Image: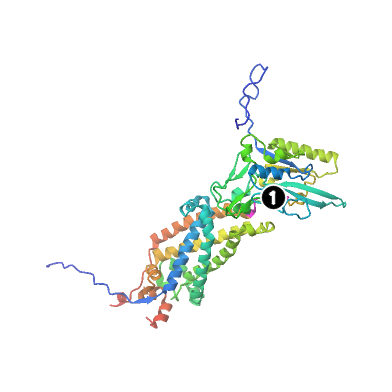
Amino acid sequence: MSGGAIVRPSVAVPEEQVVRYTFPERVNHWVNGIAYTYLLATGLALFTPHMYWLAAVLGGGPTIRFWHPWMGLVFMISIFWMHLKWKDDMVTTGEDRTWQKHLKDYVENRDDKMPPQHRFNAGQKQFWWIMLYGSLILLATGIVMWFPEKMPPNLHWVLPIVVFIHSATALVTIAGFLVHVYMSVFVTPGSMKAMLDGNVSTDWARTHHRLWYEKITGRRK
Amino acid sequence: MSNGPLEIKAISGHSGPVPGYNVSRDYDVCKLVDTTTCIGCKACEVACLEWNGYEFRETTFDNTYQTMPDTAWNFWNLIRFNEHENEDGTISWLMRKDQCMHCEDPGCLAACPADGAIVQYKNGIVDFNQANCIGCQYCVTGCPFNIPKFNAATKKVYKCTLCSDRVGAGLEPACIKACPTGCLHFGSKDDMKALAQKRADQLIANTSYKDAGVYDPEGVGGTHVIYVLHDAKNPEKYGGLPADPRVPLMVRLWKGPLKWLGGMGMIFGVLGVFMHRVKYGPKHVDRVEEKRP
C-alpha cells in the first residue's frame, strides 16, 4: 500500500504477573462476599418496609428469617479464617499514618503523592477492622435475636437494645462494603482480576503496593 | 346482621326533624377487668381455650392459685395470682386477668417487619395475622407487656385477638361471656372508662381502698383492656403489671431515626460513589515501559 500505512498497535506482550491471592484466599473471599450480599439483602428486608420486597424475591419472609442467621454463621467462619490468613498484613504501620494524612489525595487520584504501601493499604486495613469488629458485634447480637424465645421474660428489656445495635452496626458495615465494592469494580482496574484469577501485573503491584512488590520480588524499582 | 355502627332512621311519636338523624356512633371497643370482684375461677381461661380451639395445656402447680407461670402461644388468658402482704400485716389475694392489652399505640406493630402480620382495627383491636408472620419475634421486642408468644413448631407468634372474630360479628369476647361474677365488661371505651371510674369512686367512698383507680396507661396511648385496681399506685403487685408501660425507646430510635438515617445514608452513599467515579475516574497503573525513552 502506498501512502498512509496502517499503523498496527504492537501486539501486547503478556505482562509479568505476581500472585496476589492464593486459591483458598480467593474462594474464601467469594464465600464471604456472597454470604455478606445475602445478609445485606435479607437484613435490609427486615430493616425497612420499603425493602421488604427483597423478602419475596428471596423466597418469602419465613425463609429469609430462617436462613439469615445460618448465612451469618457462614460469614463468621469465613471472616475468622480470613483473619487468620491476613491478620499480619492488616497491622497498622507508620506508612499508614502518612497515607491517612494524604487521604484527600488518594480520593482525588493524586496517587504520586501517596506513600508506598504494603500488601494492603491503610484504607483497606481500616475496612478490614471495621468488618471484623462489626462482625463480632453482629454475631453477639445476632445470636440473641436468633432465639429470643429462649430469653427469660425478665431479660426482655435487653432485646430492643440488641436489635438496635445489630441494625446500627450493620449500617456501618454497609458503608464499608459500599466503598469496598465500588473501589474494586470502578476505581482500581486489576483488583477484580486479582480476586478472580489470583494474580496482578508487576506494574499494578508496584503502583498500588510498592512495599509489598519490593518484598515479594526483591526488586527495588 | 349488620356490623356497622347504629344509625337512627326514624323515631316514633315525634314531630319535626328526627334528632340524631344521620349521626352514627362509631366507637372503640374496650374490655374492663375489675380485679376487685375477680374470684380467680378461671372460667375465662377455659372459655378462651374453647372458643379459640386449643386443648387445655399441662398446668404447673406452684402452691398458688395460678394455672401456670406465664401465658403461652396456645394459652392467651391467664389469671395471675399474687398473695400480697400489706403494710399492716394483712394479706391480699390479688387476681388479675392477664392477656393482650390491645394498646392504642402498639409496640408489637411498630417493631414488626413483616408486611401485614399485625393489624390494628379502627375499633382498637390489635390482631396477629399468622399467614404473614415470619417468626422473627420483633413483636416480643416491642411489647411492654410480654404478651406475644412463639410457637416453635409453626414458627409463628400468637396472642389474644380480643375475639376479633366474635366482635366483628357483634358478639362480646368469649371470656366476657363466661365470667360468673360480672367482673368482666365489654363495650365502648368511653362507657367502660366511665364504668371503671364509677367503680373506683365507689371503692374509695365505701371501702378502705383509698388508692383504688383505673389502669389505662398513657405511655402506650391508652389500652383497649383496662383494669380497676384496689391500689392503682402500685400496679406491679398485680402479677407484674407495669406502672408506666411504653414502647421501648430503642425500638423508637430503631424504627425512627436509624431507619431514616440508614436509608438516606445508603441512597446518598451510592450517589456519592457514582459522582466520584464521574469526577475522578479510575486510578492508573504506572507502566515501567512508558517511562523508558
Residue B235 image position (x, y, % from top left): 76, 49
Q: The residue tagged with tag 1: helix, strand or loop?
A: loop
Horizontal side of residue B255 vs B100, given as left or right? left
All told, the count of numbered labels is 1
Q: Residue pushed farthest left? A: A2
Q: Position of residue B195 (x, y in %)?
A: 75, 36
Q: Is residue B214 left or right of residue A87?
A: right
- Chain containing the residue with disc 1: B
- Quadrant showing the N terminus of chain B: top right
Q: Is residue B51 magenta?
A: no
Considering depth in this image, is A79 or A186 the residue closer to the camera?
A79
Can you tell which quarter of the image residue B160 is in?
Answer: top right
Q: Is residue B222 visible?
A: no
- At x 69%, y 52%, the residue is B58
Q: Which residue is mark 1?
A: B245
Q: Quadrant of the C terminus of chain B?
A: bottom left
The foreground one among A1 and B280 is: A1
Three-letter amino acid code of the residue under disc 1: Pro
Write the start and end of the magenta stretch as one range.
B241-249
Figure coloring: rainbow
- Residue A197 visible in this rendered orientation of the protein: yes
Q: Camera-side residue: A137 or A219?
A: A137
